[in-house]
Image (cartoon, helix red, strand yellow):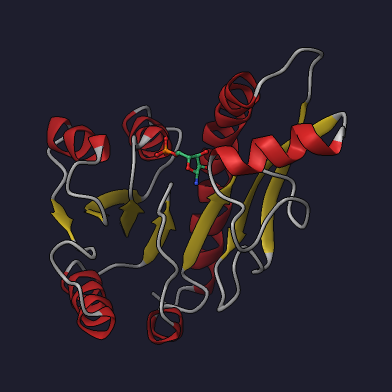
């Protein structure tokens, strides 16, 4: 049974997609052992509570010092016996110490077709505003492994999403979010199978 820790900061619809994927049996051999939010007010925490998933807050509010915050994160991940970390709407950049400790075991969902519209400053609604401003006719979502860069690790899965006439950042975000949920579950199956195949848990 692969133990997953999900890092969140906001509403948690991607967290919910993983919870639903596991509870429906679409994703097998895995469980969410812990949800860590950087934001004490994140609705993600309500979702964890509702599904009896252990949760905790580790963020600037309770760990203002960056080094202490990274150490608290690594300790929490180790104590939860984490095999795989999912960044699901997580709004902090991971310290290289954490990347090193969990290299190849951290995945992120990004609301664009990486390498387009990603990197520093491209998060949440800013991504969709940039897509609309560019005039492209399609965008999408990407699940990728996390490395020291921002949205730069090896891509696991991507799916295109059309930009429609009259789209606003909100209507586009809502359409992309549905695809995020779909490919996050599909990517999770791929990653779990690959970890099980390697057997080096
Ligand atoms: C999503 O668009 C995700 O791609 C981005 O944060 C947004 C909110 O995600 N990283 P969630 O609803 O909190 O999962």
Residue at image location 55% in from the left, 79% down from the top: 148
- Residue, far front: 133
Q: How many labels sit on residues?
A: 0
Which sits in the foreground, 57 or 106? 57
Q: Is residue 139 left or right of residue 58?
A: right
Relative to 175, say whether 103 is above or below. below
Q: Is residue 34 left or right of residue 130?
A: left
Whole-percent x and y of residue 77?
Answer: 25, 70
Residue at image location 59% in from the left, 57% down from the top: 121
Which sits in the foreground, 188 or 180? 180
Residue at image location 22% in from the left, 33% down from the top: 47
Residue 84 falls in image quadrant: bottom left
Residue at image location 62% in from the left, 62% down from the top: 151
Q: Examine the rendering and report whether any part of residue 160 can be seen.
A: no
- Residue, far top: 166
Q: Examine the rendering and report whether any part of residue 151 can be seen.
A: yes
Whole-percent x and y of residue 195?
Answer: 49, 66
Whole-percent x and y of residue 82?
Answer: 29, 67
Residue 12 falls in image quadrant: top left
Whole-percent x and y of residue 146?
Answer: 55, 68
């Amino acid at each position: 049974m692969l133990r997953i820790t999900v890092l969140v900061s906001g509403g948690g619809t991607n967290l919910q997609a993983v919870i639903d994927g596991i509870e429906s049996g679409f994703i097998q051999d895995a469980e969410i052992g812990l949800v860590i939010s950087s934001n004490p007010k994140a609705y993600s925490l309500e979702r964890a509570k509702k599904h009896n998933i252990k949760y905790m807050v580790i963020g600037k509010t309770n760990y203002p010092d960056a080094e202490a915050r990274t150490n608290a994160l690594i300790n929490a991940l180790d104590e939860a016996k984490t095999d795989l970390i999912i960044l699901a709407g997580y709004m902090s950049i991971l310290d290289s110490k954490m990347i090193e400790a969990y290299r190849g075991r951290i995945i992120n969902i990004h609301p664009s077709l990486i390498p387009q519209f990603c990197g520093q400053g491209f998060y949440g609604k800013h991504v969709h505003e940039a897509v609309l401003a560019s005039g492209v006719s399609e965008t999408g979502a990407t699940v990728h492994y996390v490395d020291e860069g921002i949205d730069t690790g090896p891509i696991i899965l991507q799916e295109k999403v059309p930009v429609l006439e009259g789209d606003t950042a909100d209507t586009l975000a809502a359409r992309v979010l549905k695809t995020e949920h779909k490919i996050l579950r599909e990517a999770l199956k791929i990653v779990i199978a690959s970890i099980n195949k390697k057997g080096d848990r």
